[in-house]
Image (tube, helix red, strand yellow):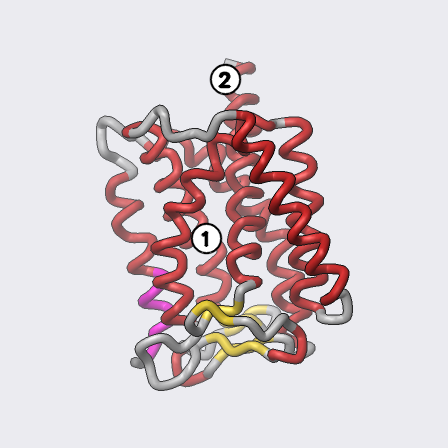
Amino acid sequence: MEHLYLWLNIASFSIPFLFSFHPKLQFYKKWRSLFPAIAIMMAFFIPWDAVFTNHGIWGFNDAYITGYKILNLPIEEWLFFICIPYACIFTHYSLQHFFPKLPFKIRTTEIIYVGLISILIVLLWYMYDRWYPLVNFLYVILLLGLVYNFKRHQLAEFLPTFLIILIPFFIVNGILTGTGIEDQVVWYNDAENMNIRMGTIPVEDSIYALGMLLTVYVLTEWFESRYIRNS
């Protein structure tokens, strides 16, 4: 399908955007915090993306993109870092609103944190010579450590919704990596990852999603707290 990547971005963004104005959610009021948070996340993730693309660690199939590029990244890839976090963070706050008892208890959060950090450290020990797990896991280990030590309640709030968010994320990412279509929209050099796939999705993508979305969520909460404190 021509311009498939663009249409996936639009489809992911459109419904959360429309429901942002729902009177019970009023998610549009968080835009003042969300969009600066997304911009800061992109300041880290776009250079990372560009370097990996230029070195052939991953890349994009010209058959599924418009062909317009900035820093050698398709315009659709730039939109991905806006549309997907928007949809996912909207989902997080919506779930929080309708299911206020969803957050994990602190003890559960501690167990998940220790388990996840331990797994990532072990994987790094064996995969330190492959660029995707090296950069990806190091970033998430540092991020989790900071959030766990300074904003543990935010981790308790985010982890259960992240598990739910992974369902639509994997649907979109599955299509991008070749599920249900002739070829891949985004291809990966398996010599630079663990070469383990969940369907068509590299397993590292789940950790990448955690790092990207948790960054946006924590920054959104930080900006919101500043606005509330100054109002």
Q: Amino acid at mark 1?
A: Ile
x then y, percent, for residue 122:
71, 56
What residue do we see at 56% from left, 69% from top? 70
Q: Is residue 200 above or below residue 125?
A: below
For mark 2, what is the residue? 228
Magenta stretch secondary structure, dominant? helix
Label 1 residue SS: helix
Q: Quadrant of the N terminus?
A: bottom left
Q: Are marks 2 and 1 in contact (CB under 8 Å)?
A: no
The residue depicted at 64 percent of the width and 40 percent of the height is 114
Q: From this view, report whether residue 57 is shown above or below residue 132.
A: below
Q: Nearer the viewer, residue 159 or 143?
A: 159
Secondary-structure class at tag 2: helix
Instruction: Indicate whether residue 4 is drawn in magenta.
Output: yes
Residue found 29% across the figure and 59% down from its top: 11
For the record, the magenta segment spans 2-9
The residue beneath circle 1 is 82
